[in-house]
Image (cartoon, rainbow, N blue to C red):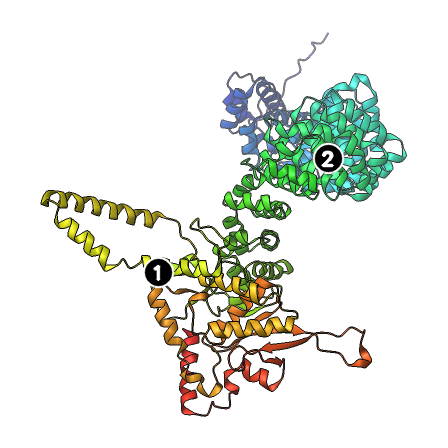
Amino acid sequence: MGKKQKKEVEPSPKDAFNSLVIESRNVHTVVLMLDSPEDEILLKACEAIYKFAEKGDENKISLLALGAIPRLAKLIPHEDKQIHMYATMAFGVMATNSEVRKSMRQLNFLPSIIACLAPDDDVVVHELATLCLASMSIDFTSKVEIHEKGGMEPLIHLLSSPDPDVQKNSIECISNLVKDYVCRAALNEINGIFPVLNLLNSEYPVIQHLALQTLITISTDVESRKALCQNDGHESLLQVLDTPEFSDLHADTLHVLANCLEEAQNVAIIRETGALEKLLVLVATSTFPEAQRHATNAITRSARNSETRHIFHQDGLEKVLVMLLGINNDAIRIAACEAIAVMSEDEASKETFRTESIAHVVPLLTSDNVEIKEAAALALANLTTANSSNARAVFVAEGVEPLVKLLTEPIDGIVVNAAATITNLALQEPIRASIQNYGTMTAITEPLKSSNTLVQSKAALVVASLACDANGRTELRNAGGLEPLVELLHSNNEEVKRNACWAILVCAKDEPTTAELCKFGALEILQEVNLSSSRKNNFSEAAVKRLLDHNTALKYALTGYLSSSDIIADGFYDPGRIKPGMKVLTLEEFSNQELNQHRPILLINTKRTDGQSAGLSIDDKLTEALSAASNRFPSSKSYTKDKSSSKSKSRGKKEEEKLKEEQLQLKTEEEEKNKPWECPYDVLFDAYISEVTRNILPLASTKEQIVALATFVSDKMGGPVSKEKLHEFTWELHIADVKFELKSNIIPIGKIQKGTYYHRALLFKALADRIGIGCSLVRGNYTRAWNEVQLVDQPPQDIIGLFVPPTTYILDLMHQVGNLMKSGSPDAAHYETYTSCKLASCKCCKQLSWYLDHFEKN
């Protein structure tokens, strides 16, 4: 029997290593194992790291510090599906930490993660890969990179994944991505809106919320809104609103629908399906204030389109807005007022709002919330624009007083809207009187000083609307509002400047206001504005004319002409020709000047300011004038008597009286210094008026009155002077004597006993205006001035009964006194200009010509 031989084992190669199971409790060791070339070790290391990172952020930070991130990134595209899966899972979990994401952004790992979204990959890989992308998409730079690496389309496909975690991560990532407008456009291009809409049917609220957040974001884009409605997105959204179980989604759903309303085309589509009416009802009755606010704001934006406003009106939006005004929520009330303001651009809506909303809006003007006051004032401003019925409704609702109070608010928007509303209300006479009773002109003074051009513009319009009444002008003048109004003429804003010109045009309807405006330089500024073709406007030109119409002194100084309708009243003064743009001083300012050699200022004034009784006869007035002159120079007799009596007093008493006299003199000087300036009373001119009224006014014809008045003026001014002896008529020396006597550059016209052309022409015009003789006053060169009168010549027999236009004559007051020279005739031309004088070649006249030229310039 033979024995069974034993089989021998072949020895292993020298470099072979028997299988070994490695277990480690050291994280650093496990991280180093990620560099192993053996798949089994890599798999165990990736699995261990995934489980370790899942436990919390501290572990993630530890792995980051040990360098696990770049090692895991290399393993994501590994051929072994298990290694690939666990590496992706670990990477996805690690990406939820912000510090880790900072490190990840330095690596080019996104293509590997996006590749994990392929349909044939494992669901677990999809879940963690989308988790990673959702985390990375929080940062803007990663949004752009995910889109550029092609991550949008596979994410859209995964929205239909059967795994809810994949859906949740995918829609979260998309919701972050579409915050960038490039990604929104990309989503629309790949038809990604419909898959997002489908998620509204999910049984998981978190997915539904994320889908709605995505839709809210993309519905801010025009093209996306159109695509949303074309995909019947509004139907899906309305289904959500119809589902009571989805009440927590209603706010976001309303927000999306409201955004869609911004397109007129979408409004029409939604309306055709009957959904618009349902939407408006839901807006009014929703229990979610934030949703109502968003919806109302979106409706406001949509209503800026006229076609959309018409649709909203037909579907009864006005009633919905009135209901929103009744909700006790400031944000909703503000949104409703803003919507009313926009809808008020439609006339039909204005009519509806009159009975529905004005009574609800007016009380909001007194709210403690400044934003509510601003929105309410805006709504009323638009409701009352070009609508007198709505203006009356605001008045009936007692809205005037709170509107006037809003003018003093520090918020520019409130002031602008309140001022606009007041301007609209002031167009009606009864309301305007009520507005003024609340001190509007006083309240508007501060807005006129604002640095905001819109406030300035609206404030000027308020002045223009209220200054048409004398009470309004007086209040503005007393409140100091004229100076800031004039300052607005310097504005570079065309609207501000135009409205300021308009306000000044209205204000310049009476002499006190006109004088105040001119005092602040309104005339000079307007003249400067009118010199520029680009800066002037119709109101600036009209304002200059109005200022001059109500201030004949300025008009004559600047234009050198007064028509028969320009009446010379008390206080008129002639400072001579003033160049355009130069400041015209007031009479009081002229009176404060030192005595000079310049042309005197001629004054016309019969208004008493010293309390004396009026209506004295001419003899009484002359006696009064002589008495006043004699009182200035006490007689020597009385002086001697005082002196002799004083000698009889004791030395101590004399010193005491002297001290009292000095104190009395100081007191008198102080009183004189503080005494307000008074315009000098011209007693002689007052006597002239009485005389011509008694002797010339009763004459039968106008021509007789003119000739008689011309003779009267000539007699008072030195009588006729022949042309040959004109140079011997030393009127200028007489004027100098009068100035020296009065110690003033201002000479009342009655004080002049030797007057040349311009003195006589002014006196004739002043007297003619008092007795109703129509004449004009024209300033010529040098010392020339003349009066023009219009008379109807006797018509020929063959045209009796037909209208004959009057003829203009120039009246001679200097040479052939009373001679009427037809305008345009050689005699009239000679009278008008000194240079046409036939004696101009003589030496004497040449000297006189030079003197007059020099005198006129000075």
Classify 189 as above or below 138. below
Across and down, in percent, residue 787 comes to 57, 73
Which residue in the structure is indicated by mark 1? Answer: 629
Mark 1: secondary structure: helix
Tell me the amino acid under the disc marked 2. Ala
Sequence-first disc among 1 and 2? 2
Tell me the amino acid under the disc marked 1. Ala
Q: Residue at x 52, y 16 (%)?
A: 25
Which residue in the structure is indicated by mark 2? Answer: 339
Residue 395 at least partly seen: yes
Q: Residue at x 52, y 63 (%)?
A: 689
Classify 469 as above or below 769. above
Q: Residue at x 41, y 68 (%)?
A: 600
Mark 2: secondary structure: helix
> Dot 1: within a 10 Å radius of its alpha carbon, few (fewer than 14), some, or many (20 or more) residues?
few
Horizontal arrangement in the rendering, residue 250 relative to residue 649 (left or right) = right
Across and down, in percent, residue 22 comes to 56, 18
Label 1 to label 2, Cα distance in Å?
Answer: 77 Å
User: The C terminus lies in which quarter of the figure?
Assistant: bottom left
Horizontal arrangement in the rendering, residue 149 relative to residue 812 (left or right) = right
